[in-house]
């Protein structure tokens, strides 16, 4: 029987687990967080743009007849509480999910990255997984097939120009928040403060709307919103079929246009350096000439990319531009831009790697492309379990 290791119990890792269970495969799911849906819970206060009807796969709906349906937009917390937790509890997945267990690295027994290049004999050696258990101890597990569904949310991008650290960025780590926080539940942290917000995607747009609302009750709250694009379009989609997304885009554009005194947009700006002055952070921004702003906190919402150090010793062909697995990345680059709802799955061949039996699925498979949607992941799981598992483990 093929031993399958599934890395990550997010929506797509659990989807893969269900597919494995239905094929009576031998599988284990490793989840770094203490609960399933660790990343989803990190953005638990945010509502999805897609309704329940589009957030539950046909496979899960059949296995979990009470799964939510309809037009309501769940928050991340609801997605975890009402879908992922009940799914993890079904008898087929019982005892298969190791919570609090992080996979630190994956290699091939007896082979380094540069050995047996493109040689199918690599598949005759099992994968070795270095794991860290909840009690802090480490150990090695083995598998014939590895599905890496560890997502991107745990690896936020850095603040500085060119995607590298700004000068002194590491020294201010404790005052930089890199995840969209539940602002309303942390008033002491944000009220009456001056905040540098970076990024122009949906997370930054959500943050600026929440901070502007916050500023109405907490005068003195100021947001300096630095975005790299000189003329940001906020990712607006013509005749957007997702009303929540459309209204977020338009609210963010209004704030960028001066609708709130609390928000100052700095378009075409990058972050150069951070320095301390008393209890303030002096941020050097650059748009042509450098200039300084004095802030209390930094909210760096610049997207993320999956952890590729995890498979450093495997023969994974990564795209030099997006860091996604090459075949899928080139298919995605061919259709870059537009609405994520218009992106369709690209077929099993795009999921194949030079490393036999190693598959990157879910949000991580999209590299730096942020257009991943759950339904793409369900199809990826179909593709892998349709034909690739046997080929990979051979
Ligand atoms: C704010 C936000 C809103 C979104 N809204 C939508 C939407 O409306 N509709 C939609 O279709 N998509 C949406 N997405 C995109 C996407 O569907 C989600 O990101 C989804 O959670 C991706 O699922 P995943 O299983 O690939 O990865 P994740 O949900 O990121 O799960 C990865 C899991 O792996 C675990 N993990 C990480 N590293 C390790 C390790 N080394 N070892 C073990 N476990 C590890 C993490 O703890 C996590 O639980 C949204 C994304 C975000 C961030």
Image (spheres, rainbow, N blue to C red):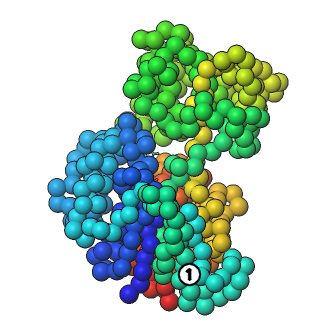
Q: Is residue 167 left or right of residue 177?
A: right
- Say if 239 sits above or below 359 in the image: above
Q: Quick one: 284 or 55, which is closer to the camera?
A: 284
Residue 388 visible at all: no
Q: Quick one: 263 or 235, which is closer to the camera?
A: 263
Where is residue 207 shown, x and y percent of the image?
49, 29
User: Which residue lies at the image location 40% right of the left edge and 24% below the top edge?
Assistant: 184
Which quadrant does the N terminus fall into? bottom left
Q: Quick one: 330 or 109, which is closer to the camera?
A: 109
Q: Quick one: 313 or 71, which is closer to the camera?
A: 313
- Say if 188 sits above or below 114 in the image: above
Q: Is residue 306 left or right of residue 72?
A: right
Where is residue 119 shown, x and y percent of the image?
65, 88
Q: Secondary structure at mark 1?
A: loop
Where is residue 70 shown, x and y percent of the image?
22, 47
Where is residue 325 shown, x and y percent of the image?
60, 66
């Amino acid at each position: 029987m093929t031993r399958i290791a599934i890395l990550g119990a997010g929506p797509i890792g659990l989807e893969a687990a269900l597919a494995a269970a239905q094929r009576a495969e031998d599988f284990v799911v490793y989840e770094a967080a203490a609960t399933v849906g660790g990343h989803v819970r990190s953005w638990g206060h945010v509502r999805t743009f897609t309704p329940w009807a589009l957030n539950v796969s046909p496979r899960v709906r059949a296995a979990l007849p009470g799964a939510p349906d309809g037009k309501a937009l769940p928050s991340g917390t609801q997605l975890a509480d009402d879908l992922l937790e009940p799914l993890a509890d079904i008898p087929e997945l019982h005892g298969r999910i190791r919570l609090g267990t992080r996979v630190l690295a994956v290699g091939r027994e007896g082979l380094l990255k540069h050995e047996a290049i493109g040689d199918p004999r690599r598949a005759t050696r099992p994968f070795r997984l270095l794991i860290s258990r909840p009690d802090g101890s480490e150990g090695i597990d083995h598998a014939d097939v590895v599905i890496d569904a560890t997502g991107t949310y745990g690896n936020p991008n850095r603040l500085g120009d060119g995607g590298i650290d700004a000068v002194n960025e590491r020294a201010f780590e404790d005052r930089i928040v890199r995840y969209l926080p539940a602002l309303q539940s942390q008033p002491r942290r944000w009220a009456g403060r001056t905040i540098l917000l970076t990024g122009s995607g949906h997370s930054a747009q959500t943050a600026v709307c929440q901070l502007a609302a916050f500023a109405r009750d907490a005068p003195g709250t100021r947001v300096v919103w630095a975005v790299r694009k000189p003329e940001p379009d906020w990712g607006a989609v013509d005749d957007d079929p997702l009303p929540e997304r459309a209204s977020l885009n338009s609210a963010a554009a209004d704030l960028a246009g001066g609708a709130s005194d609390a928000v100052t947009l700095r378009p075409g700006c990058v972050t150069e350096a951070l320095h301390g002055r008393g209890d303030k952070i002096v941020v050097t921004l650059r748009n042509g000439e450098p200039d300084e702003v004095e802030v209390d906190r930094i909210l760096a919402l610049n997207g993320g990319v999956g952890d590729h150090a995890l498979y450093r010793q495997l023969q994974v062909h990564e795209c030099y531009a997006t860091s996604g697995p090459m075949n899928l990345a080139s298919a995605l680059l061919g259709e870059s831009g537009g609405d994520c709802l218009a992106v369709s799955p690209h077929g099993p061949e795009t999921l194949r790697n030079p490393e036999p039996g190693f598959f990157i699925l879910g949000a991580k498979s999209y590299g730096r492309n942020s257009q991943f949607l759950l339904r793409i992941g369900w199809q990826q799981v179909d593709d892998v379990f349709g034909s690739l598992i046997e080929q990979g483990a051979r």
